[in-house]
Amino acid sequence: MDEGHDKGDGPGRGGPVGDDDYAVRAEGLEKRYGDKRALDGFDLAVRKGTVHGLLGPNGAGKTTAVRILSTLVRPAGGRATVAGLDVARQAREVRARIGLTGQYAAVDEVLTGRQNLEMFGRLFHLGGRRARLRAAELLERFDLSDAADKGVGAYSGGMRRRLDLAASMILAPAVLFLDEPTTGLDPRSRGEVWDAVRALVADGTTVLLTTQYLEEADRLASRITVIDRGRAIADDTPDGLKNRIGGDRVEVVVAERADMPRVVKVVARVSDGEPEADESEARVHAPVTDRVAALTEVARTLQDEGIRVEDIGLRRPSLDDVFLHLTGHRTDVPRTKEAAA
Ligand SMILES: Nc1ncnc2c1ncn2[C@@H]1O[C@H](COP(=O)(O)OP(=O)(O)OP(=O)(O)O)[C@@H](O)[C@H]1O
Ligand SMILES: [Mg+2]
């Protein structure tokens, strides 16, 4: 590696002959914690030079997958390669080609941004001068030059995550694992992190990004694997996934539950899919293509028919919608059953 703009081509590229277009491949990964199956036959294929989203709710197995792929944990079964190298048999070589940003930021609060990056550079044996150069370069790239000499304790959440990203890029890894890089950030900080991730990929790094937000996977990833209970339950482009769910939805919360069947009929007229009625929340929702026309039509009809509503609106599909469609259950159902199975 040098101090350079050589992302995917630095230490990272290559791998044995026969390596294909994939930066990450996993087949049938297994991992248990006690009788809990954290991974249960997990498959994944990530194309080189892309952002790949790994989308799933709490406890789905995202971090476990990332930990196995980044050689921190050994799988109990299955196999995986990263940059063409076997994560179990060639762990050391894999480690030289990857970067990892964990669910929680790893930077030191007391040091400045620049000191943090220089410290990481020295940890990676860059030597003083190259560590300084690399730090300056990364501060610039992640738009942290102005704050470079302030203590990290004074950074916003978004700045901190960007510094974390910069730290994981010290050696210009071929493959970068980002575990929920924007969880807990406000929308503006989230946008800043997204821009930083886009810049990395433009430089040739392959990114595997875990997230609980469909919107985030949609914005960044060219392909999304949905994980549930340790298994991939879908692997598709963002558009493919959204088409399966039906795109945007019109949603009505009725004032009187007794009106729900009538509301279902009204909503069905503008929808290109079956409306779903959620009795417990007095909510009816359905996929629509022409969102504004659909909303207007539903609002007018409900008023004409004298049906009182608590709320009416348009909603982009959420992770919950993905789950309901792929699995028939929501993300928040208790997931203890499989332990007994
Ligand atoms: N070290 C551990 N010891 C015991 N159980 C664990 C351990 N790590 C993970 N698990 C369990 O394995 C399952 C998968 O956990 P994992 O952390 O991979 O999920 P996740 O998708 O990253 O969730 P989150 O979105 O909350 O980060 C969970 O049920 C979790 O409780
Ligand atoms: Mg996790």
Image (tube, rainbow, N blue to C red):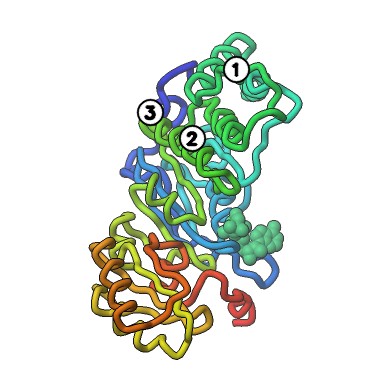
The quarter in which the C terminus is drawn is bottom right
Res 88 visible:
no
Between 193 and 9, which is closer to the camera in this rendering?
193
Q: Where is mark 2, residue-wise?
A: 192
Report which quarter residue 109 is drawn in. top right
Looking at the rendered structure, the kind of residue marked 1 is Leu
Q: Where is mark 1, residue-wise?
A: 126
Between 274 and 52, which is closer to the camera in this rendering?
274
Res 44 visible:
yes
Q: Residue at x 34, y 67 (%)?
A: 245
Tell which circle, 1 or 2, labels the residue nearer the N-terminal end.
1
Query: Answer yes or no: do the residues labelled 3 and 2 have beta carbons within 8 Å?
Result: no
Tell which circle, 3 or 2, labels the residue nearer the N-terminal end.
2
Report which quarter residue 64 is drawn in. bottom right
* Image position of 65 with respect to 329: above or below: above
- Residue 160 drawn at (x, y percent): 62, 33
Give the left or right position of residue 279, taking residue 31 as reference: left
* SS at badge 1: loop
- Residue 23 drawn at (x, y percent): 40, 43
Q: Residue at x 34, y 73 (%)?
A: 286
- Residue 259 drawn at (x, y percent): 41, 87
Alpha carbons under labels 1 and 2: distance apart: 28 Å
Looking at the rendered structure, the kind of residue marked 3 is Asp
- Residue 320 drawn at (x, y percent): 47, 67
Q: Where is mark 3, residue-wise?
A: 203
Tell which circle, 3 or 1, labels the residue nearer the N-terminal end.
1
